[in-house]
Image (cartoon, helix red, strand yellow):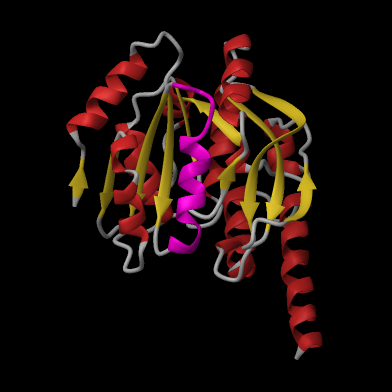
Amino acid sequence: MTILSQESLELREDKQNSGLPLVTIITPSFNQGSFLERTMLSVLNQDWPNIEYLIVDGGSTDNSVAIIEKYKDRLAWWVSEQDSGQTEAINKGVRRAHGKYVTWLGSDDVLLPGAIRTMVEALEENPSAGMVYGSVVFIDGMDRVIKENSYTDMTLDKLLYHKHSTIAQPSSLLRNETLHRAGLLDESLSYCMDYDLWIRLHKVAPSINLGDTVLSGYRLHADSKTVGSYRKMALEKIRVNRKYTNDIINKVIYSHYWYIIEGAIKALWRG
């Protein structure tokens, strides 16, 4: 089922004529009705007036479609149909993106007020940069802050060889042209498609680090991929790293093997 109302077309045309850079935000969604409305409102309530919002739902069987339909007149496009998972859903949105800048926001995460404006202004001031990113707060199912995390200035070398080789994806914005130069997400990956993309992006353009500027809330809950499948995520990151380094062992590989061992020890201790 694909919906693109005349009202949405007119809204998008008005925004594109506003003179401000268009930002495309994609939310891949599947059975996250408990959080989806909070995610959508965090985008729709941004103070940046030129946003193209796309929802790519994987055929949810909960109340997700009803929530999407509630806000359909404020969306540029949405679909609810079966897909192979989050990575395919994001790529489906990217292929429809008209924005100068693009990002995706998981259906359980949130953007903080002013996040898009802050990131667009940084990229406009730094035309050679392909991506901007900042800090994140980890939140629980009730939106309570668990902790805040900021990230080092990221380079290709750090992504490949340093222990702390990550960026908070919900707190990032990409230049669409750079994204297409680097290539879209690898649909064979389920957990570390963003890590794989960051590597390819940093081969073609530098990034901007906004340091302690908190831009998003990354939700940790029992059904989230980060919480529920950490071993699979760690193994996938090792596989991606080896694709680019051909290393048997380095700091990234070692640290993720150690995370798996730590997880097994904790599970045995709890048992």
Q: Is residue 87 magenta?
A: no
Quadrant in the rendering for residue 52: top left
Rendered residue at 39%/11% (across/down): 18
Q: Residue furthest front?
A: 70
Residue 79 shown left or right of residue 174 in the figure: left
Magenta segment's dominant SS is helix
Rendered residue at 33%/63% (across/down): 60
Q: Residue furthest bottom?
A: 271
Residue 196 point in image, percent of width and height: 55, 43
Magenta region: which residues?
Answer: 32-49
- The C terminus lies in which quarter of the figure? bottom right
Q: Is residue 21 above or below residue 103?
A: above
Q: Is residue 182 visible?
A: yes
Residue sitting nearer the eye, 218 or 253: 218
Residue 223 shown left or right of residue 188 in the figure: right
Residue 169 shown left or right of residue 10 in the figure: right
Q: Is residue 39 magenta?
A: yes
Quadrant in the rendering for residue 6: top left
Count of number-bearing discs: 0
Residue 242 point in image, percent of width and height: 61, 50
Rendered residue at 74%/78% (across/down): 264
Quadrant in the rendering for residue 167: top right
Q: Is residue 175 above or below residue 71?
A: above
Residue 180 point in image, percent of width and height: 41, 27
Q: Is residue 81 above or below residue 131?
A: below
Residue 261 point in image, percent of width and height: 76, 73
Q: Is residue 187 visible?
A: no
Residue sitting nearer the eye, 20 or 94: 20
